[in-house]
Amino acid sequence: MSGELCAFCGDEYIVDLLEFWTEERAWMFDACCEAAHEELCEMLARDLEGAREWVRELFADYGYPIRRVYASESEMALRVDFGLELRDISLVEAKAFIGEHHRHNAPPVSWRWGHAVYNGHELIAVAMVGRPVARMIDASKVVEVNRLCVNHELDSELTWKACSMLYTAAAKEAERRGFEKVITYTLETEAGTSLRYARWKPEHTTRAQSWNRGARKRTDKAPTCRKIRWARHLKPVVVPKVDDRREMEREAKRYGLELPDAEPVMQDDAA
């Protein structure tokens, strides 16, 4: 990155991205002189938010589009946020990720499809979509995000908006497959901010109860507190229909023919 003359050394003002370690998200830049380098370091330390656009342009010049640079509290250093990328994921990969990172649930049994979010090379969040757990919900019309999981060991800056991206992707795919609604559950103590951001709405609060029954012995492996059921209603798939009468009228007008009066449409009696 070059500009005007440097106020310190008098040469052309130059800032270069000297080294970049993608896996560590670490980087090092160089300047035309030591004084210019120190000034840039002070600027980043003093006002990283204000210098964000400058940093993004620096990385873009070298072919690295990034979302932002942030100060990592865990490493006490500046790190690169590449931004979010939505990808497909296999059942095996999704279950392995959830088994390692989910806070209070094991991987679900149900599976129709899944979504994954990457930040750079790193898998940071996963969603598994399957049949509704509640037996009274019509599985031919409704699908459920049975599990959504984020790697909370990462800096929160890297996972920012990952959950809402997954909920949105699940809804879009459900709509594409012809489902009328997609649902999911959160603990009553969870705010559901990502769901609201993805335009889901709370529609029901379940009772706090155990899965164990007298006629169906089970060991509870998940929280038994009250849960909020969230839903997003999807647009019905409209199949375009050909208006035969209108087509016939156009053809008759074209060839100078006359059509008989249209027959009344008979409707079935209500059941």
Image: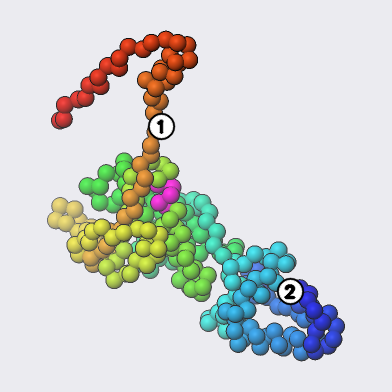
Nearest the eye: 109 or 266 = 266
Give SS at disc 2: strand
Quarter of the image where the C terminus is located? top left
The residue carrying mark 1 is 240
Image vertical order of residue 14 relative to residue 151, above or below: below
What residue appears at the point 80 percent right and 84 percent down from the top-left corner? 6
Q: Amino acid at mark 2?
A: Leu
What residue appears at the point 65 percent right and 85 percent down from the top-left corner? 43
Q: Counting other residues with Cα less than 10 Å from the Cα at mark 1, is it few (<14), some (14-19), or many (20 or more)?
A: few
What residue appears at the point 31 percent right and 59 percent down from the top-left corner? 201
Nearest the eye: 90 or 26 = 26
Location of residue 261 by image quarter:
top left
Q: CA distance from mark 2 to mark 1?
A: 55 Å
Location of residue 57 by image quarter:
bottom right
Q: Can you give x and y, in whole percent of width and height, for residue 132 in the image? A: 30, 50
Quarter of the image where the N terminus is located? bottom right
What residue appears at the point 80 percent right and 79 percent down from the top-left corner? 4
Disc 2 to disc 1: CB gap under 8 Å? no
Is 93 magenta? The answer is: no
On the question of residue 152 being in view, the answer is yes
Mark number, residue 201: none
Q: Amino acid at mark 1?
A: Pro
Location of residue 14 by image quarter:
bottom right
Q: Which residues are magenta?
A: 170-174
Give SS at disc 1: loop
User: Viewer-nearest of labels 2 and 1?
Assistant: 1
The residue carrying mark 2 is 17
Q: Can you give x and y, in whole percent of width and height, for residue 213 in the image? A: 16, 56
Mainly helix, strand or loop, the magenta region?
Answer: helix
Side (left or right) of 197 relative to 216: right
Q: Can you give x and y, in whole percent of width and height, for residue 70 in the image? A: 57, 77
Q: Can you give x and y, in whole percent of width and height, for residue 82 in the image? A: 59, 66
